[in-house]
């Protein structure tokens, strides 16, 4: 079944790192919103509901510490016009924006930034409209996968949608990275089944597939490291409170790993260094082998036996505990290097890992710098993403620590 979705993407803008400058930017941003005469749901650190609104969307306690940078303002818009205004005011105020769909980004990039920022939480954009006759649905990107599956099941006992298994993952983030799931061998990725989308660009314009053009429509379906606009919904045919700290890493396996080679993995799990560990393997092949690696930005098609997601969780506070578990994860990842893809060692953007390369957190990022991680996520498609980025966002208004950069002369 194909489904349409309202697809909001992460927006990031330049802003000063100085406290005084950030306070000025915050005040300018708020004044801009108030002038619009629209009723925005706005939360600042002085608001009693600020912490509860912020923490509701956080799915990883690693980014809920006293040292974690917090947004200057949280906005929970209920209309497209409100989102447009937030984007325009952020641009006018030279302030970063982060957008949270479900809060499952493994590195917290949907709700954390080391420069002053505003958080758009899409919790109120969860409308799902299903058309049984043509087997399509429009899905707002604040919806979760669980909500989507539930709505489909209420309409039909035979239709479904090929996406992930975690019910609290946001539709927007999931599809923007490609979206793997248990039905990908029969139907491909979630993004392979998106036939239209609507987004808001840096100028506040609402664009659908026809008006955005095929290059941008290609880029938003799997180019998760390519912030380019605020997705509203997608045509395809929120979350529980966090309980644990976590770290993840991705891999792809292209040759069988022998039983003897697997035995080395058990040493890591039996050592008792990490408390809760998982290795999740998702088999490829089938329909995935039939779709070109250039069809979408997601390039991991024919030749891959399965993808791996390494996960470690812990429930103890403190930097020492975090470092112990993350160190364990990094050593396991290093151990697996001889058995997985190489040149590049491929990675899945929805299992984001800042260890494989980071853009400048402040200022411009060069093509060479961004390519370090970009080539692992997108392979040769990275260059096409750069071309699209240069065309639609030459000033790099939308950016994050692993986003696609524009070419700068």
Image (cartoon, rainbow, N blue to C red):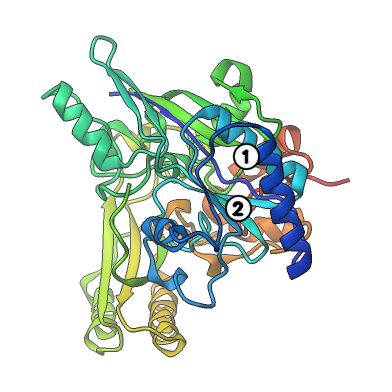
In-image side of 103 versus 345 (left or right): left
Residue lying farthest left? 157
In-image side of 377 versus 127 (left or right): right
Residue 301 image point, x, y percent: 41, 42
Neighbour tally class for label 1: few under 14, some 14-19, many 20 plus, Cα within 10 Å: many
Q: Residue at x 43, y 72 (%)?
A: 62
Relative to 3, residue 57 above or below:
below
Q: Split into 4 quadrants, where in the image is the N terminus?
A: top left
Residue lying farthest right? 409
Q: Which residue is nearer to you in this view: 282 or 245?
A: 245
Q: Residue at x 44, y 57 (%)?
A: 105
Give the alpha-carbon distance from disc 2 to disc 1, as whole Å: 9 Å
Q: Secondary structure at mark 2?
A: strand
Answer yes or no: is residue 235 visible.
yes
Residue identifier under label 2: 118
The reply to whether callout 2 and callout 1 are in contact (CB within 8 Å) is yes
Q: Which residue is nearer to you in this view: 214 or 123?
A: 123
In-image side of 115 versus 239 (left or right): right
Q: Which residue is nearer to you in this view: 254 or 146?
A: 146
Residue lying farthest top? 133
Q: Split into 4 quadrants, where in the image is the C terminus?
A: top right
Labelled disc at residue 86: 1
In-image side of 277 versus 142 (left or right): left
């Amino acid at each position: 079944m194909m489904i349409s979705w309202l697809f909001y993407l992460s927006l990031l803008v330049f802003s000063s790192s100085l406290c005084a400058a950030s306070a000025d930017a915050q005040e300018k941003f708020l004044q801009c919103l108030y002038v619009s005469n629209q009723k925005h749901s706005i939360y600042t650190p002085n608001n009693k509901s600020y912490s509860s609104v912020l923490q509701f969307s956080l799915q990883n306690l690693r980014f809920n510490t006293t040292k974690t940078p917090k947004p200057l303002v949280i906005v929970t818009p209920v209309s497209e016009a409100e989102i447009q205004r937030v984007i325009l005011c952020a641009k006018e105020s030279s302030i970063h924006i982060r957008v949270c769909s479900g809060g499952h980004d493994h590195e917290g990039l949907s709700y954390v930034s080391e420069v002053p920022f505003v958080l758009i939480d899409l919790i109120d954009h969860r409308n799902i409209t299903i058309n049984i006759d043509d087997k399509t649905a429009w899905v707002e990107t604040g919806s979760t996968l669980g909500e989507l599956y539930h709505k489909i099941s209420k309409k039909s006992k035979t239709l479904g949608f090929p996406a992930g298994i975690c019910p609290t993952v946001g539709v927007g983030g999931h599809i923007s990275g490609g979206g793997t799931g248990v039905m990908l061998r029969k139907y491909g990725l979630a993004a392979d089944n998106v036939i239209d989308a609507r987004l808001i660009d840096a100028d506040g314009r609402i664009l659908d597939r026809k008006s955005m053009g095929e290059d941008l429509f290609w880029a938003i379906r799997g180019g998760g490291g390519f912030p380019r606009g605020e997705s509203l919904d997608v045509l395809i045919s929120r979350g529980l409170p966090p309980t644990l700290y976590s770290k993840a890493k991705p891999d792809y396996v292209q040759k069988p790993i022998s039983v003897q080679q697997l035995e080395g993995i058990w040493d890591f799990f039996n050592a008792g260094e990490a408390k809760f560990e998982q290795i999740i393997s998702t088999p490829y092949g089938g329909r995935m082998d039939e779709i070109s690696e250039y069809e979408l930005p997601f390039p991991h098609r024919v030749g891959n036996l399965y993808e791996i997601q390494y996960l470690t969780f812990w429930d103890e506070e403190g930097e020492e505990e975090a470092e112990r578990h993350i160190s364990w994860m990094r050593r396991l990842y290093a151990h697996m290097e001889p058995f997985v893809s190489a040149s590049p060692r491929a990675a899945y953007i929805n299992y984001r890992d800042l260890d494989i390369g980071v853009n400048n957190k402040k200022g411009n990022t060069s093509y060479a710098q961004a390519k370090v991680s970009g080539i692992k996520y997108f392979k040769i498609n990275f260059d096409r993403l750069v071309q699209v980025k240069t065309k639609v966002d030459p000033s790099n208004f939308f950016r994050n620590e692993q986003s696609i950069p524009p070419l700068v002369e």
